[in-house]
Image (cartoon, helix red, strand yellow):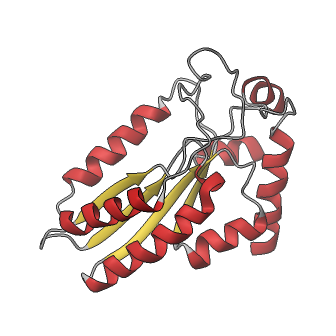
């Protein structure tokens, strides 16, 4: 019953779904949407998950550098977004991605406040979403995402049932991650009900 609900709501997706291509398609749609300026921001390439680490960085294909976006790069990004606003735009839509974007909440905090201000000054509505592995998505972080960062949708990646997920997405510390992710989600859901 819970698995069917998760599938129907899009929480679980079939292994044949190319989630990376869906992100590209979503981004292209946002670019082509004449009323919305859509921007995907990667505040850090770091991720606490090991994801079957190999010479290519793991199954996600990323090298997990510990650095996050510095203030100079943040300023360049805000300037670029501000200059990219056209008269036809009615909405500024930000997607936070990574690595693990929640490993750089200080960057999200700083940029969100600036981008919300940019949207307000340009009479644009503002919305944002975030994709996370879920290990850092505690109840407190979820509240900060919603109330402070104005993130109105959070996508959590689970790679199937516990055994499958943990075989693919254990932490760099060697510990499984499924129970942590599910516990975090339960805490958020139970508080909102």
Above or below, 83 against 181 in this view is below
Residue occupying image coordinates x 64% and y 42%: 157
- Please give left or right for residue 21 compared with residue 171 in the image: left
- The answer to which quarter of the image holds residue 47 is top right
- Image quadrant where one finds the N terminus: top right
- Please give left or right for residue 93 compared with residue 14 in the image: left
Q: In this rendering, does residue 193 appear at all?
A: no
Tell which residue pokes out farthest to the left in this image: 87
In the foreground, 125 or 102: 102
Instruction: Report x, y in % for residue 122.
Output: 24, 81
Above or below, 182 against 84 in this view is above
Residue occupying image coordinates x 69% and y 42%: 4
Tell which residue pokes out farthest to the front in this image: 72
Residue occupying image coordinates x 68% and y 73%: 143
- Please give left or right for residue 32 compared with residue 128 in the image: left
- The answer to which quarter of the image holds residue 165 is top right
């Amino acid at each position: 019953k819970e698995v069917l609900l998760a599938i129907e709501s899009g929480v679980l997706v079939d292994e044949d779904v190319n989630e990376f291509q869906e992100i590209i398609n979503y981004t292209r749609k946002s670019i082509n949407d004449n009323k919305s300026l859509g921007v995907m921001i990667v505040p850090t390439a770091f991720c606490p998950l090991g994801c079957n680490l190999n010479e290519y960085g793991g199954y996600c294909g990323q090298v997990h550098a510990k650095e996050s976006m510095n203030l100079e790069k943040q300023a360049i990004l805000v300037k670029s977004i501000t200059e990219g606003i056209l008269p036809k735009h009615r909405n500024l839509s930000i997607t936070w991605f990574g690595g693990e974007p929640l490993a750089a909440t200080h960057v999200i905090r700083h940029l969100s406040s600036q981008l919300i201000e940019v949207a307000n000054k340009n009479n644009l509505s503002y919305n944002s979403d975030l994709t996370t592995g879920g290990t850092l998505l505690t109840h407190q972080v979820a509240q900060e995402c919603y109330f402070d960062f104005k993130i109105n949708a959070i996508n959590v990646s689970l790679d199937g049932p516990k055994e499958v997920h943990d075989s693919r997405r254990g932490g760099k510390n060697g510990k499984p991650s499924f129970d942590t992710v599910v516990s975090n989600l339960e805490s958020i859901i139970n508080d909102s009900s």
